[in-house]
Image: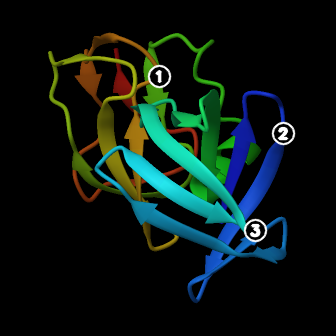
Amino acid sequence: MVKVIANNGTSFEVVNKNDNVFINNEEVAIDISSINEETFHVLFNNKSYNVSVSEINHVTKLYTLIINGDKVTFEVKNQHDALLEKMGLSDTSTKKLNELKAPMPGMVLRSLVNEGDSVKKGDSLIVLEAMKMENILKSVGDGVVKKLHVNEKDKVEKGQLLISF
């Protein structure tokens, strides 16, 4: 399941189950044909659309498409984004890059940075296993890693300091 929010404020949930697409729990007829790497022809509920990919930003999860000549920007959130939002960890634009704390209890699988490394907003820092899922913790801003407070295979508690910047 993904939640899609368009630049006009419209939001909807999209689910793909057994090659059937549901939008807000209603099955829709959709057929997508690739013309080239960035251009597609889409039949959606028996209407034809020409779609070109204009811009993709995987860090901010913003996608800009040209649909029949109109520029439309979408924000796409998956269940992991919803979980982070529920935990109050989704608004990274206002946080200072001073430290990284564990958002949940788990085990450090690996550190992707070393002390002294420069990091940019969106860079992957640590892989944390929690609830049998691997979670990649990313930088909320630019900075330099001052100190790693954990090692691989360390068990951590929610709120435990992982990295100082």
Question: What type is the residue that disc 3 sits on?
Answer: Asn
Seen at 32% across and 10% down, the residue is 143
Which quadrant is home to the N terminus?
bottom right
Say whether disc 3 or disc 2 marks the residue closer to the N-terminus.
Answer: 2
In front: 109, or 5?
5
Q: Residue 140, which numbered label? A: 1
In the image, which is nearer the foreground, mark 3 or mark 1? 3
Q: Is residue 62 left or right of residue 36?
A: right
Query: Are the residues at dot 3 and dot 2 in contact (C-beta closer than 8 Å)?
Result: no
Q: Is residue 117 visible?
A: yes
Mark 2 is on which residue type?
Answer: Thr
The kind of residue on which mark 1 rests is Val
Q: Earlier in the sequence, mark 3 or mark 1?
A: 3
Q: Secondary structure at mark 2?
A: loop
- Cβ–Cβ below 8 Å for labels 1 and 2? no
Q: Quadrant of the C terminus?
A: top left
Residue beneath the point at 45% across and 13% down: 97
Q: Nearer the viewer, residue 157 or 89?
A: 89
Q: Which mark identifies residue 45?
A: 3
Say which of marks 3 and 2 sits in front: 3
Name the residue at 20% across, 40% down. Answer: 112
Which type of secondary structure does the marked residue at label 3 adopt? loop
**Residue 17 coordinates in the image, percent (x, y):** 63, 83
For label 1, the SS is: loop
